[in-house]
Image: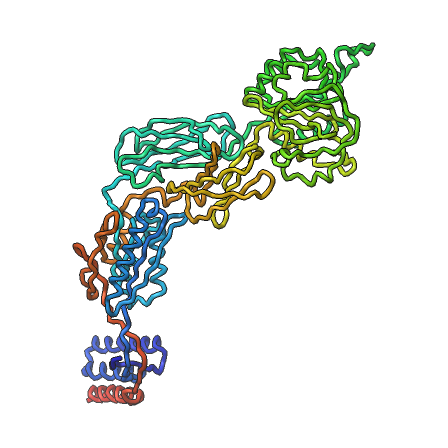
Amino acid sequence: MIGADRIGWDPALPWPWIIALGVIGALLWAAYIWRKGDAPLTRAAGLTLILIGLAQPLWVHERREPANDIALVIVDQSESLALAGRLEAAQRAGQRIAEQLGRESGLDVRVRQARGGPDGTMLASALEDSLADLDRNRVAGAILITDGQIADAPADPQKFANAGPVHALIVGDPERGDRRIELISAPTFGIVGENMRIRAQVHDPSNGPVNVRVSIDGQQVSNTSVIANQPFDLDVRTPKRGPNMIVLEAEQGPREISASNNRAAFSAVGVRDRLRVLLITGEPHPGARVWRNLLKSDPAVDLVHFTILRPPEKQDFTPLDELALIPFPTQELFVDRLDEFDLIIFDRYRRRDILMPIYFDNIARRVENGGALLITAGPWDATNDSIFRTPLAGILPSQPSGRVIQQTYRPTPTALGQRHPVLRGLPNPQQWGPWTRQVDARASGGQTILSGAGGRPLLVLDRAGKGRVAQLWSDQAWLWARGYEGGGPYGEMLRRLAHWLMQEPELEDERLSLQNTADGLTVERATLGAAPAPVTVIDPTGQQQQVALTETAPGVFRGAYATNTQGLFEARNGDLRAFAARGPLNPREAAALNATDEYVRPMVEASRGGVIFTGEDAGRLPQIRRIEGGARAAGDGWIGLRTNAAYTVRASQAEPLGPGWLWAFVGLALLMWGWRREAK
């Protein structure tokens, strides 16, 4: 504690009034000089004493306590340092700098970490926020420990001019190159099976050729050689409906800082132009309207429906001009335009002379090439008129026994059906209404997911080549639509069945997905088999972690992966791949990883600080010196922090330097004496 004396003031009028009176007095005195008055000094002294009297001078005695200066140490702990392997080096440098400053007398050290975010590293904002809480008279300076890749370089660096010297210690080697890939433009959706164009660029210290691999959901689709530092275009096709994770990956360079920014990704939603469905109803019946209404209610479905009202063998005497029928365009449907249909449905179709065997042969080939076929059986499927007695038999997983069962039974999911995406999670099957007829059949293959009377196969699914097949051995689903004895989930079940046949991604039997949560990611694995092995999750840095799964519903297993890291994550389980992004798919933190002073140097120079490169391991830390205000603040191998000599007043005592009226009286007396001199 030290004592100090100073002059203070206790004005009788507000300071603006006193200043205004002073300005008026000065103008009057100047006019007096201009008119060559005889007593300028007397009048000046008089006016001054009057103003002093109004300001009321005090003699102030203070007891002051010296205040420590404050040094700020801001350590960059963003993802860009982690991706480049410099995070621990920056932490060590921050600890060593803080320990060195802690040994300085009269200096307080404030350490703060700056982390990255969706918009990159906000290092300048962290410095500005730290300074906002401090007395600027006590700030000795700031030391920034970073790789220099900041996203908030100030537009006006001069706002840090009075922040004490700001120094930047750059962790990393500025001569070390880094190859990275940048997406210039990428579509957000694409028509399934049609080309969409991507524009990108590989940034590299060299200008040579670089191989770029393109993969969709983990499956490589192309490998192209491009020229570094020049934009290039690629055409890719979305293979399926729904999200498609498209990843562009440049091969690693000779001196890579990290391979994490060699990859750029985007999600493109695959959409079908229209899902085309061909529905052939063998004869009018109550269930035909159920299928028609279901398919017509889906705006993504383009339905072509034919009902056979007049078979060829029917002969009567109705005049042709009174028939409201059209010929069945078999040649156009089953030869010329068959490949345009994604799903073909035979609803209670009876084998007649309408369709020739070659047409069924074409349908079988269409299914094996990626199409879908659904057959709902009618009573004659137990006879020689069954559609099973056509070339379609080669792709059908179940066969009729030749008997129709006429009894009441309740459709029941099998053990496999409870796990299958077509039936999984439907309302309680014990409350489903009964059906009254079923064609007896034997399943020689495929997946029986719904059983009927006596446990016989009722709904059988199978894959045929690249396509899918389903057989429903009853035409009684319309009873659920009518609410017979409580009805059942006919709409949801038939919708799922149609979408499973058309290979919609969310209804795949074996599926792996990643979903964002507040604390990280949720891994979901759907399977028809036993409990799957743990899922491998790969983070943006390439680190792998096994995630154990727990069954949360029949055939559905979930696990949690905790993380705060931003970027593209990949999950692997067997041949399955899934992707998810936390934050931006291509975060700014991973855009550039090379050490640079380009963004921090303007604010460093504005504050008269210095920039020092410390190396990859931050081993070349500078010496720290205390300097006087206005002195040079940085040099070869050293940086300086300002000494402010700040203090805190703990007690003070003020005594007036005479009454204010006395000062004013003396001043007025001097003015009158000056007038008297002029009168003589």
Q: Where is residue 552 in the image (x, y as percent from the top left)?
A: 58, 44
Which residue is depicted at the point 32% across and 83% down?
Answer: 54
Foreground residue among 390 and 152: 390
163 vs 623, left or right, is right
Q: Where is residue 122 in the image (x, y as percent from the top left)?
A: 36, 52
355 vs 122, left or right, is right
Give the answer, above or below, for where 191 lies relative to 108.
Answer: above
Q: In the rendered image, is residue 253 in sight?
A: yes
Give the answer, above or below, for where 597 lies relative to 269.
Answer: below
125 vs 604, left or right, is right
Q: Report which quarter residue 320 is drawn in.
A: top right
Q: Where is residue 191 in the image (x, y as percent from the top left)?
A: 51, 28
Q: Report which quarter residue 669 is drawn in.
A: bottom left
Foreground residue among 154 and 529: 529
Foreground residue among 171 and 26: 171
Which residue is depicted at the point 58% across and 18% down?
Answer: 366
Which residue is depicted at the point 74% across and 16% down?
Answer: 383
Q: In the rendered image, is residue 304 in sight?
A: no
65 vs 586, left or right, is left
Give the answer, above or below, for where 76 lies relative to 136.
Answer: above
Q: Report which quarter residue 326 is drawn in.
A: top right
Count of picture labels: 0
Give the answer, above or below, for where 661 lies relative to 560.
Answer: below
Foreground residue among 341 and 531: 531
Which residue is depicted at the point 54% across and 31% down?
Answer: 241
Question: Among all residues in the image, which is located at the extreme left?
Answer: 636
On the rendered image, what quadrant is the N terminus found in?
A: bottom left
Q: Position of residue 642 (x, y in %)?
A: 23, 64
